[in-house]
Every structure is written in C-alpha cells, then in structure tokens.
Amino acid sequence: MPLELQANAPDLSSLIRPGDTVLWGQANAEPLTLTRALMAQRHDFKRIRVLLGIANSDTCRPEHADAVDFLAYCGAGANRALADAGVLDILACHYSEMASQLSSGQLRVDVLMLQLSPADANGRHSLSLASEYLLCALEQAAVVIGEVNQQAPWTYGERTLGLDELDAVVYTDRAPLASESASIREVDMKIARNIADLVEDGSTLQTGIGAIPDAVLSALNDHHNLGVHSGSIGDGVMRLMQSGVVNNSRKSRDAWLSVGGVLIGSQALAQFAHRNRSVHMRSSAYTHDAQVLASLDRLVAINSAVEVDLTGQVNSEVAAGSYLGAVGGSLDFIRGAHRSRGGLPIIALPSSARSNSRIVARLNGPTTIPRSDAGLIVTEFGVADLRGLTMKQRVDKMLSIAAPQHRADLEAAWARGGLAGS
C-alpha cells in the first residue's frame, strides 16, 4: 500500500531526491495540494527540475527559481511570467515527439504527480481531467504520487490506477481548477463564420485553445453529426455535444466518442465529463499520432497563430519578444488534416493587433509551421487556401486577407526582398 500523506501538510521529503525531475498534469489537472507542497518545501531538495505544461495556477512563480529549474513545452498561462523573468527553459518539440520522448526516457521524469478521481467499485482510480503525456510518463517515472480528489470527475480512458500502483497518496476534497472561457470579440466571430462556412456536416474537429477556436465552435450550431478528436476538449465542445451537433456518429474512427487528451474548461465541463461514456480520454501518443489523424475522414484542424508571413510560414510561439505560445501540437494536426480525406488544415488569426499587421512580409519570431505545410489561412477578411499554389500566387492570396490599410506596405516589403529575403 502507498504511503499516506497528510492532506493539510503533505511531507514529500522521503519521495523526492535532489536533482529529480517532477511532472504533473497541466491546466486544471494540476494536483494542487501536492504542487503547492512541493514549492513550499523546495529548499529541502537542494535543487530540482519541474516540467510544466499549461499553468492555470500561480503555483510556480519566478522567485521559486532559487531552488527549481523550470522547463515547459509552452509559455501559456502563468508560464509567461516565468519566461519573461528569464527562468523558464523551453522544450521546443512537437507534442507527438514529447510523448515518445517521455516513453523512451529521452525526456527524463523521476517523480510523477497525478490528480485522480475517487475509486470505483473495483478500487480503480481514473486519471480524471488529463491523460495525454501523463500516460507516457507513467511508463518510466520512478515515483508516482496520487492526489485522490473527492471532487475530481471520473473519466473513461486508456487505463485506470489502483492504489498498489502508487508510491504515495493524499486524499483531498476540493473543487478542481477551472478555466474561464476566452473573451470573444466581433473580429473573432467574423473569422469563425468564415471557417464555419468551410466545415461540412460529418466532419471531425480539432481545435486549439483560445478565443478563435471557441468562437468557431459557437458558430457551428447549425451543423450536423460533427465529431471531435483533439488534444484538448473545452466548454465549446461540451455545448455542441449537449445540443446534439457533436454526436461523433460519422467518424471513420472512434465512432460515437469525443476523443481528447485533456479537459480544459469550467466546473460544468468537469461535471459533464463525469462518468460520461461519450467522452474518452487518450494518451497524446494516440491523439497526435500521424496515422491516427490521417485515418480520420474530413479532419478539420483549427489552430491560431501569432503571425503568418506572405508565403504561409507560421509563428505560434513568440510575440513582441515574449514566449507565450508553443510548438505544441499544431503541426501534428495540420499535417494530419493534410493527409485526411477531405481534411482542412486551418490556421486562423485576426489580420491586425492594434496598429500592427499579423500578416507579415517576414516572420518576427520562429517558424513553428513551415511554408511546405501551409494549408488554409483565415482572417476576418476571408480565406487564403495556399494548397497547390506557387509563391507568387500565395503572396497574392495572403494580401487579399490582410487588413486593407496594411496591404500596400506588405506588397512593397515583399517586393524589396522577394524570395531571397523570405
């Protein structure tokens, strides 16, 4: 049986060694009792490393770098403060590769902390709000610590855990973390309507996180028999499932199931997913697998970006010198949608941010998605389908969806550099 820790002050000193790498569920799957105890006791371990996903809490703060090395695949949420303070190292890899690196041990995890649901009648605990890369880390973590949260939803997925598979456990009774929906502006809805017009009934959806993906989901209320296969599932998917728009009946794989790796949304989403057999949580080794994605007919991959250049190169990581995005899974899904029969690989973004164009002659940040993988770029001014186009044709298409006030400057900047400067 595992070591039982005190809920009010769990002592981790016998479980974590100096130099260990610690990982836990991202976003609302964070086992908050354990993670806060870890930061409070950080000096007891001399120096450790923490591998972060999206951070929806203030558990890890820049001052904690006095005893902790922070590593993350993204700059989302509270990670941005760590990045701006210069104490966050970025794991620049595709989400699909992160899964394989964890499974193989190339990306080492010594201690895994999990938020678990209460046990079922067979004494098994579900991984609740997240499976994704946690399942990959389970294969090689030396120490597994579970926070069994009385209010964590039971979700169906690839595997469950018994107490005999844990090294330590703490029992809590608290509302899991929740995320507020992004504020949707009129420009987001214009983009969403442009995308909704492209989506056929019976399509399978993948959406990223943020205002535009949320807006797209809200614009699909008149569609029928949609499916979901995504890295994350949020409130927008829940609402479409409740209305019957998403029923997964025409999926070419995992029919009748909304498949995702992590639930990121409100308390209502957690309650909706509780013992809901139509929501299936899977490892990121499955959700982001190239062959799995290619086997899904009419896969519509909808992801956002910081900026896109006139040839279709995408920066989804850095804005104004601040690391706030990720390499993440966008290219995995873009490539999957390219290979899907009837698929749509979509990158969506507003044409401008304040006075600056987000359609640019040349990227101001890293190339997250190369031009060779370009699909459909969507702004409030329309759709640029770059598939099968030459560079000159792409430039013309991209200029047509840029903000009108920026088009002349963009054309002139391209003319000055052309292909040699891109």
Image: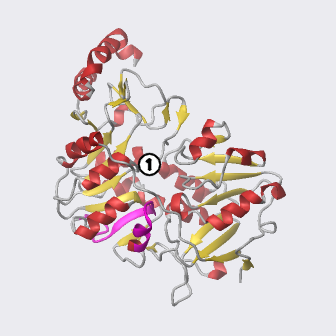
- Tag 1 residue: 329
Please tell me whether residue 261 belongs to the stretch shown in magenta. Answer: yes
In the figure, is residue 141 to the left or right of 313?
right
In the figure, is residue 165 to the left or right of 64?
left
Residue at image point 45% right, 32% down: 367
User: Seen from this angle, which residue lies furthest top?
Assistant: 416
* Percent x, y of residue 216: 27, 50
The image's colour scheme reads: secondary structure
In the image, 181 versus 155, the foreground residue is: 181
Residue at image point 39% right, 19% down: 422
Quadrant of the image containing the N terminus: bottom right
* Percent x, y of residue 351: 31, 31
- In this view of the protein, can residue 106 be seen by the observer? no
Q: Residue 40's quadrant in the figure?
A: bottom right
Start and end of the magenta stretch? 251-271
Residue at image point 40% right, 69% down: 268
In the figure, is residue 303 to the left or right of 223?
right
* Percent x, y of residue 347: 33, 40
How many numbered tags mark residues here?
1
Instruction: Please determine whether, in this image, residue 6 is positioned above or below residue 368.
Output: below
* Percent x, y of residue 140: 64, 63
- In this view of the protein, can residue 411 be seen by the observer? yes
Please tell me whether residue 33 belongs to the stretch shown in magenta. Answer: no
In the figure, is residue 179 to the left or right of 384?
right
The amino acid at mark 1 is: Gly
Residue neighbourhood size for the residue with mark 1, other residues' Cα within 10 Å, grouped as few (<14), some (14–19), many (≥20): many
SS class, disc 1: loop
